[in-house]
């Protein structure tokens, strides 16, 4: 009897239409397997779905990241093709040619008209994704790649260099963070000075259910005093997301060793009490 019930439930689930999230992810995946107009159509489909998902739930980090990915894909495809064609027409090896802004002024202005909004929307979505998931290395890398694409549309070498360096800085963030996480030494929280402490919002559903307790995390604080890694140690699951969102925003005075700032690892407990 139980087998029949499970089989019926499985068949019912299989018969359900795919969610927007599943359709969007599938469309985005397919776009990278296509080219030309078919690729653009799949990107359009994925973008419509992810925009609907983000509008329904602005806290959906994956939707914001994917919109940033779509923006980069559109811009990269256009600029890569344009630059290669220009150099081919001039008999110049694309890969060995010194990079810089698109040199044809009219072409650069046309591309800017077509893609400046795409770039800025993409960067805004990646920024939001990183606000929601500060440890999202893929979003950091995509941010760097999109900024470097923007550099190609700058109107002078100086602005190009500024964006190019900024893009490189974002691309280096995952490696730098991983290195600091690996090097972090254990320090008790009492030895660390908090300069910005964000208090969590008590989840209404948890308060209504009279759930209280301590959400505990192990965090890594970088040489600038920012939280760069956070691991849940324990606590009521209903309280973890709110506490986690708050702790990511904490800022500390950098810890010094021999007068040099060092990354540290410590534990933080966030208490939720019904008497708050």
Image: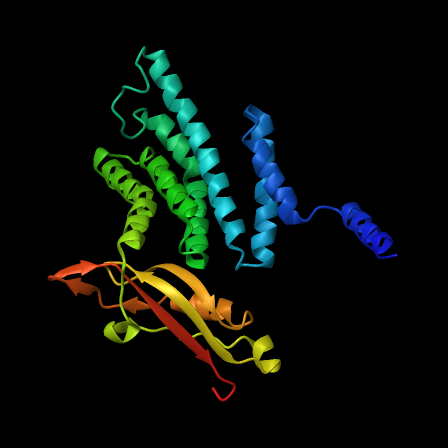
Q: Is residue 114 visible?
A: no
Q: Residue furthest top?
A: 91
Q: Is residue 272 above or below residue 118?
A: below
| Residue 176, position as x, y percentages in the image | 28, 48
Q: Residue at x 42, y 61 (%)?
A: 231
Q: Indicate the quadrant where residue 244 lies.
A: bottom left
Q: Is residue 60 visible?
A: yes
Q: Residue furthest bottom?
A: 275
| Residue 271, position as x, y percentages in the image | 44, 79
Q: Residue furthest left?
A: 258
Q: Residue at x 40, y 47 (%)?
A: 137
Instruction: Please indicate whether residue 113 sits to the left or right of residue 9 in the image.
Output: left
| Residue 241, position as x, y percentages in the image | 50, 67
Closer to the camera, 267 or 77? 267
Colour approach in the figure: rainbow
Q: Is residue 5 above or below residue 141?
A: below
Q: Is residue 174 above or below residue 214?
A: above
Q: Indicate the quadrant where residue 30 lies.
A: top right
| Residue 122, position as x, y percentages in the image | 45, 45
Q: Residue at x 60, y 44 (%)?
A: 48
């Amino acid at each position: 009897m139980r087998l029949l019930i499970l089989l019926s439930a499985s068949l019912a689930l299989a018969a359900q239409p795919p969610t927007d999230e599943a359709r969007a992810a599938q469309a985005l995946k397919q776009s990278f397997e296509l080219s030309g107009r078919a690729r653009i159509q799949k990107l359009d489909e994925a973008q419509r779905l992810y925009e609907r998902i983000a509008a329904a739930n602005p806290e959906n980090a994956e939707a914001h990241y994917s919109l940033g990915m779509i923006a980069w894909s559109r811009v990269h495809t256009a600029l890569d093709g344009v630059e290669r064609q220009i150099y081919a027409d001039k008999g110049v090896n694309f890969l060995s040619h010194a990079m810089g802004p698109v040199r044809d002024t009219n072409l650069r202005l046309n591309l800017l008209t077509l893609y400046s909004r795409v770039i800025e929307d993409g960067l805004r979505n990646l920024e939001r994704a990183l606000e929601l998931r500060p440890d999202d290395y893929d979003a950091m890398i995509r941010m760097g790649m999109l900024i470097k694409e923007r550099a190609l549309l700058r109107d002078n070498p100086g602005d190009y260099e500024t964006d190019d360096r900024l893009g490189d800085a974002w691309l280096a963030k995952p490696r730098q963070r991983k290195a600091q996480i690996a090097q972090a030494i254990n320090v008790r929280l009492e030895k660390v000075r908090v300069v910005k402490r964000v208090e969590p919002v008590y989840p209404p559903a948890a308060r209504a259910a009279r759930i209280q307790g301590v959400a505990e995390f192990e965090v890594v604080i970088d040489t600038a005093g920012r939280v760069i890694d956070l691991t849940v140690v324990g606590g009521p699951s209903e309280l973890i997301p709110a506490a986690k969102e708050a702790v990511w925003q904490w800022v500390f005075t950098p810890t010094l060793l021999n007068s040099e700032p060092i990354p540290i690892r410590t534990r933080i407990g966030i208490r939720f009490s019904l008497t708050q």
